Amino acid sequence: MLEKNQLFTAEIEDISSEGSGVCRIDGFTVFVPDTAVGDVISLKIVKVLKSYAYGIIDKIITPSADRIENNCQYYKKCGGCVFRHISYEAECSVKDNIVKNAFKRIGGLEPEFESFISAENNYGYRNKAQYPVAMCNGEVVSGFFAPRSHRIVTLTDCALQPVIFKDILETVLDYIKDKKISAYDEASHTGIVRHIYIRKGAHSGEVMLCIVARKDISRQLSGLCRIAAEKFPDIKSIVMNINPDKTNVILGKKCITLYGSDTISDIMCGNTIEISPLSFYQVNTVQAERLYAKALEYASPDKKDIIADLYCGAGTIGLSMAESAGRIIGIEIIPQAVENARKNSCINDIGNAKFYCGDAGVVFEDLRKNGCSPDIIVIDPPRKGCSADTIEAIAKASPKKIVMISCNPATAARDAKMLAERGYTTVKAVGADLFPRTKHVECVVLMLKPDTH
């Protein structure tokens, strides 16, 4: 049995889905962050559980060939970029293996794995950032939460954000300090400003600044609107979001536009998409377009096909397929998202898409009663994957093809296995990197009914 504070020498053999190196000592699996496959290290055990343990690097004895110099001063404090110490090629190899291992080990499936979709750009690719605000040593600060905590790592510059985000964030912080507007305190539920939230259209360049506050401070922010609008011509919208609740949820339900438009717009797969503070919109636009192109390739609809887009959000996936299909039926349980989808459909003059608010099973049953059933189902579930009811609804709808886009290969593999038990064959799968330098990886999966392949 390993014990805390023991020192061992070991070679890193693999990387976990959380981005930690994996080695084995006396039959125990030990996870060690900030390591690379091929590293020979001296490690210190810091936590021991029943069948595995956690360690930290004491000393790198022989560095892996995958190692590179870390180029971010916040890297180890912030914890967001778990792969900043290895080459991007090595990172893509790790993520490709995470996808393959999930389907083989969790799903018990052996699809054709296509070439991993790597990103062309590793810097400044995020179109959204949400910076928590707090008091630190009597001063208002902002940055990101340290791993597994609500302690803020103070920073304004992040290599994953566009440069303009840093400049806007610093301008807002200067204004808040100058006007003595208080920062929110989670423990006491006092103070005003909770988050500074910035969005940017990757193709349009339009920027939205959103101040998340515990209560309405419109009058106090009037000067900020003037300063920000003059300093940053790309800002087309300044919004105050009011979140009065004692919660970890960032945004409240009420938005008040202080300057410009209620929304900004961007282009996604050739369609104009309106984005509000509450809209879901893929964080890496360019990679999302490549992901959706692969989903369209897998779906390969013809002009007679009805495509049902589950968890459709603002409709971006379904709308990207509308030109190739007969009809698009989007299903989403969040009313505001359905509103956004309908609006985006109108903006782009897409007449063959209809969006429903409700549970997939209920909507499918209503459609079936009216003589309509989907030929292809596209699903883009949250990280927890599909609910059992959704799996049953999909199986009952009996489409010829299912295309799944997932931000969690583990739950994607689990759901594919459940659909395999209901008669579907997982034919193809591919990993895609929408979040370079972080632990996250997406995948696209094609499943077919036996009589269609």
Image (cartoon, rainbow, N blue to C red):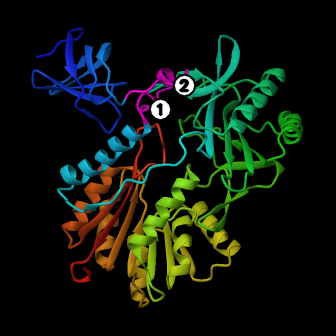
Expressed as whole percent of the image width and height from the top left, the position of residue 160 reads 57, 37
The residue sitting at 47% across, 23% down in the picture is 69
Expressed as whole percent of the image width and height from the top left, the position of residue 60 reads 31, 15
Q: Earlier in the sequence, mark 1 or mark 2?
A: 2
Q: Nearer the viewer, residue 76 or 214?
A: 76
Q: Nearer the viewer, residue 264 or 239?
A: 264
User: For mark 2, does the 10 Å Cα neighbourhood hold few (<14), some (14 to 19), or many (20 or more) residues?
Assistant: some
Instruction: Identify residue for label 2.
Output: 72
Mark 1 in CB contact with mark 2 (< 8 angstroms): yes
Q: Quadrant of the C terminus?
A: bottom left
Q: Quadrant of the N terminus?
A: top left
Q: Nearer the viewer, residue 443 or 406?
A: 443
Asked if residue 408 is among those painted magenta in the image, a careful observer would answer no
Q: Amino acid at mark 1?
A: Cys
The residue sitting at 59% across, 44% down in the picture is 126
Rendered position, 414 above or below 180: below
Expressed as whole percent of the image width and height from the top left, the position of residue 298 reads 39, 71
Query: Range of the magenta residues?
Result: 67-87
Expressed as whole percent of the image width and height from the top left, the position of residue 265 reads 71, 59
User: For mark 1, does the 10 Å Cα neighbourhood hold few (<14), some (14 to 19), or many (20 or more) residues?
Assistant: many
Secondary structure that dominates the magenta span: loop
> Residue 285 vs residue 296: left or right?
right
Q: Nearer the viewer, residue 300 or 79?
A: 300
Instruction: Identify residue for label 1.
Output: 81
> Residue 291 vs residue 130: left or right?
left
The residue sitting at 66% across, 25% down in the picture is 190
